[in-house]
């Protein structure tokens, strides 16, 4: 049987210079903060998936600004090999609230992030370096 990595997406969005993170409701990393995101559904584009997942977990409507990067380290998710397309998003509506797989959605100062799930600290560091945000 052939094994293939699963495709995921993550979204990065700021409110007044603070990054939006969700607190994970389920394992792995239950109770840890993470970028909003999740699995791409069959027949769905990564662009549609990140907008859907971000809305489901934060209550915020967004549009894509740009691709931040693709993260594919085989050990990045303890459930198995995942590949994540990460997008920078612009908020266009909605109200910040946790939903779906998120027990809460909050904003954090970029210099004061909590311990993050998966490789999300690496992703955010890459984003900040690319955007030259301190």
Image: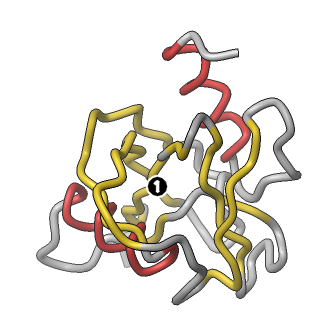
Is residue 62 shown above or below 38?
A: above
Residue 98 point in image, percent of width and height: 60, 81
Residue assigned mark 1:
10
3 with respect to 42 (left or right): right
Relative to the observer, which residue lies in front, 29 or 101?
101
Q: Is residue 131 above or below residue 111?
A: above
Residue 77 at x, y = what percent? 65, 62
Between 67 and 89, the residue placed more toward the observer is: 89
Residue 103 shows up from this direction? yes
Secondary element type, mark 1: strand
Up/down of 5 relative to 71, above or below: below
The residue located at (32%, 64%) in the rendering is 93
Left of 45 or right of it: where is 97?
Answer: right
Q: Residue at x 75, y 77 (%)?
A: 28
In which image quadrant can residue 90 be found? Answer: top left
Question: Percent position (x, y) of residue 121?
Answer: 73, 40
Residue 39 seen from this side: no
Residue 134 occupies quadrant: top right
Side of 98 where 83 appears, left or right: left
Q: Residue furthest top?
A: 132
Q: The N terminus lies in which quarter of the figure?
A: bottom left
Report whether 52 appears left or right of 96: left
Task: Tell me which residue sits at (64%, 71%) in the image.
Answer: 105
How far from the left and from the top, in percent, is residue 96?
Answer: 53, 71
């Amino acid at each position: 049987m052939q094994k293939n990595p699963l495709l995921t997406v993550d979204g990065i969005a700021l409110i007044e210079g603070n990054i939006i993170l969700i607190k994970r409701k389920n394992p792995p990393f239950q109770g840890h903060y993470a970028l909003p995101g999740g699995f791409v559904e069959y027949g769905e584009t990564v662009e549609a998936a990140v907008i859907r997942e971000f809305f489901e977990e934060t209550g915020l409507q967004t549009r894509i600004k740009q691709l931040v990067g693709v993260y594919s380290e085989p050990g990045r998710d303890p459930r198995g090999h995942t590949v994540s397309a990460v997008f920078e998003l612009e908020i266009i509506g909605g109200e910040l609230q946790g939903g779906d797989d998120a027990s809460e959605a909050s904003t954090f100062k970029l210099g004061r992030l909590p311990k993050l799930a998966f490789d999300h600290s690496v992703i955010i560091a890459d984003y900040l370096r690319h955007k030259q945000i301190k």
